[in-house]
Structures are given as C-alpha cells and as structure tokens.
Image (cartoon, rainbow, N blue to C red):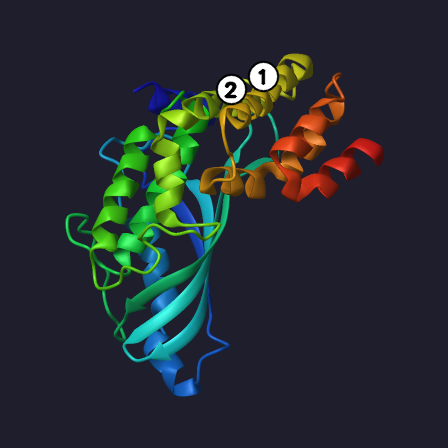
C-alpha cells in the first residue's frame, strides 16, 4: 500500500514492529488505599498491551507512533472501576525536530472491571471493557496517522473503530459507546470521520500534513498554501451546514496552536478571520497570533 511505502521512505529504516509506542500514566489519588491494591500492575499491563499488540494486518514499516494515555481513576468498587482518560498522539515532521499533535481527547466515561494481575488478550470479535477501549483508541490513532500520509488512508482503521463502538453499545458497559449529545463521544468521532460530509476535510487533512507541514522547512510558500486548503475546506463545510461536531472539536482542540503559529507566515491575513469563524472556541489564540507579532 502507498501509505506503508511512504512511511518506509519517510523514516528510512528497516525492520517491522508493532504500531504504537504508548506511554501510560495512572492516577489513583481519588481512590481509597484498599481500592488501589488490585491496580498495582495495571499501568504496565495496559502499556504492554498497547505496545505489543499488532493492530494492522500488514507489516508495519517505519517508526512507531508516539502516543500517551493518562488514566485518572474516579471510583472503585472492586472489581468495578470508572476512569477519565486523556489520549494523545503525535507524528514527526520531515526535516524537522518538531512533532505535530494529531489527537488530544478527554474521554470521561470509561467503565470496566479488573482483577489483580489480570491478563489482557486481544479478541476484537468479542467486547471486552478494557481491550475494546484500548483497541478503539489504537485504531483512531493509527487512522489519523494514515490519513496524514495517504489520502483517506485511515478509512479501514476508522471502520474497525466503529465496529468496536457497535460492540460496546450493546454490552453491559455501554456508557461512552452509545449516541450522545455531549461535546465528545467515541461514536461521534468515528462516525464523523467515516461520513461523506467530511471527505473533503480528510483529503485536505492529508494536504495539510504531507504537502504542508512535511515540506515547510524547505518550501514554506507552497507548504502554507497547502495547509490553508484545510481551513478553506472546513469553511466550505460550515457554509453547507453545522460544523459543531465531535470531529471538528477534536481537530481544533489538537491543532489550534499549531495553526495559529503556522499561519503567521501566510500572506493573506484574512485567514485568521476564517479560523475564528470556524473555530470560535480558540478565538483568543488566533488573535494573539495575529496581533501579537
């Protein structure tokens, strides 16, 4: 596939590996001491699962995707737990020491059971309140990474994430998997990513990264023009209907700082007006970039 060839060229390395390098952090401050004991090995168990599970059918050529998961335990009634989880991922930029933040979400509704020293095994045909949650975010992370290297390259991974959503929605742990009016939901994110409504967004997402950020170091003029295509694509989607959706919130929560800084070199200063129109939540960030130069 083109995507995997591009990654091979990008990293210029040989060898095959699992896809993720995920740093897992666990916070149990809200739990009583007795409730913490069964979780003694939880952090390493989850981290090992994410780093050692193979999520794609192909040989993974190139570097692992750097990501992190911060698990903030909220309640415990052994073996039942609830947690808030912050998930982020990033990708390197060609000819640069900087990384681009690809995902930054705060998932506040993870409910699961866990026994001390419990092992985690991947079986995506059966819902598991821990591994299905991990698999879902693995596929979202891989899918976004793939979309940034190959136009619509993440579709099959987003489809796998949606399959997990559907399994979760009919399980005894359906919280967080069903339709929701909240600003963030697992279902809403992957349904938006797979919606024809956002096809132009995903195509421009590729241009923004592969023909934008990745060439910024040696062809700034062309890079910023290709990056601007994403702003205009979102504005066109807005003109056709509401963009107050999960995908747009997740995207701007991840990218607002990067865009505010990058477009300082763009000749058309009106792009900041467009950014504030399509992303009013981060108006101050764009104003600071525009007027703070």
Q: Which mark is residue 182?
A: none
Residue plotted at (51% across, 37% down): 248
Q: Quadrant of residue 114?
A: bottom left
Q: Nearer the viewer, residue 111 or 198?
A: 198
Residue drawn at x 27%, y 36% is 159
- Residue 286 in the image, given as x and y percentages of width and height: 72, 36
Q: Which residue is mark 1?
A: 226
Q: Is residue 161 something one can see in this rendering? A: yes
Q: Nearer the viewer, residue 227 or 42?
A: 227
Q: Are marks 1 and 2 in contact (CB under 8 Å)?
A: yes
Element carrying mark 1: helix
Q: Secondary structure at mark 2?
A: helix
Q: Which image quarter holds the N terminus?
A: top left
Between 30 and 19, the one nearer to me in the picture: 30
Disc 1 crowd, CA 10 A, few/some/many (<14, 14-19, 20+): many
Q: Quadrant of the C terminus?
A: top right
Residue drawn at x 67%, y 27% is 274
Instruction: Give the vertical position of 260 relative to 200 (above or below).
Output: below
The answer to whether residue 12 shows anywhere in this view is no
Q: Quadrant of residue 289?
A: top right
Residue tagged 2 = 207
Please, is residue 211 above or below residue 44 in the view? above
Q: Residue drawn 26% across and 63% down?
A: 173
Tell which circle, 1 or 2, labels the residue nearer the N-terminal end.
2
Q: In x, y percent, where is residue 163?
A: 23, 43
Rendering coords of residue 292 (x, y %): 84, 36
What is the CA distance from the residue labelled 1 to the residue labelled 2? 6 Å
Instruction: Judge the density around disc 2: few (<14), some (14-19), many (≥20) Cα neighbours within 10 Å.
Output: many
Residue 183 is situated, as x and y percent measured from the top left of the image, at 48, 50
Q: Residue furthest left?
A: 125
């Amino acid at each position: 596939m083109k995507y995997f060839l591009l990654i091979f060229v990008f990293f210029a390395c040989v060898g095959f590996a699992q896809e993720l390098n995920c740093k897992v952090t666990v916070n149990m401050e809200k739990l009583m001491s007795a409730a913490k004991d069964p979780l003694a090995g939880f952090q390493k168990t989850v981290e090992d699962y994410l780093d050692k599970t193979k999520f794609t059918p192909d040989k993974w050529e190139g570097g692992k995707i750097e990501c992190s998961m911060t698990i903030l335990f909220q309640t415990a009634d052994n073996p039942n737990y609830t947690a808030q989880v912050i998930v982020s991922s990033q990708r390197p930029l060609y000819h640069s020491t900087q990384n681009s933040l690809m995902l930054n979400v705060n998932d506040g509704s993870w409910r699961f059971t866990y026994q001390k020293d419990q092992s985690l095994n991947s079986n995506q045909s059966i819902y598991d309140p821990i591994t299905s949650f991990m698999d879902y975010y693995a596929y979202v992370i891989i899918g976004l990474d793939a979309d940034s290297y190959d136009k619509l390259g993440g579709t099959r991974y987003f489809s796998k994430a949606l399959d997990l959503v559907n399994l979760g929605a009919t399980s005894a742990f359906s919280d967080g998997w069903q339709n929701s009016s909240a600003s963030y939901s697992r279902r809403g994110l992957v349904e938006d990513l797979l919606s024809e409504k956002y096809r132009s967004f995903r195509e421009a997402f590729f241009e923004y990264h592969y023909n934008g950020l990745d060439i910024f170091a040696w062809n700034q003029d062309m890079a910023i023009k290709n990056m601007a295509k994403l702003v205009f694509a979102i504005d066109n989607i807005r003109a056709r209907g509401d963009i107050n959706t999960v995908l747009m919130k997740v995207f701007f929560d991840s990218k607002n700082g990067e865009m505010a800084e990058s477009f300082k070199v763009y000749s058309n200063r009106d792009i900041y007006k467009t950014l504030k129109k399509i992303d009013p939540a981060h108006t101050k960030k764009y104003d600071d970039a525009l007027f703070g130069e």
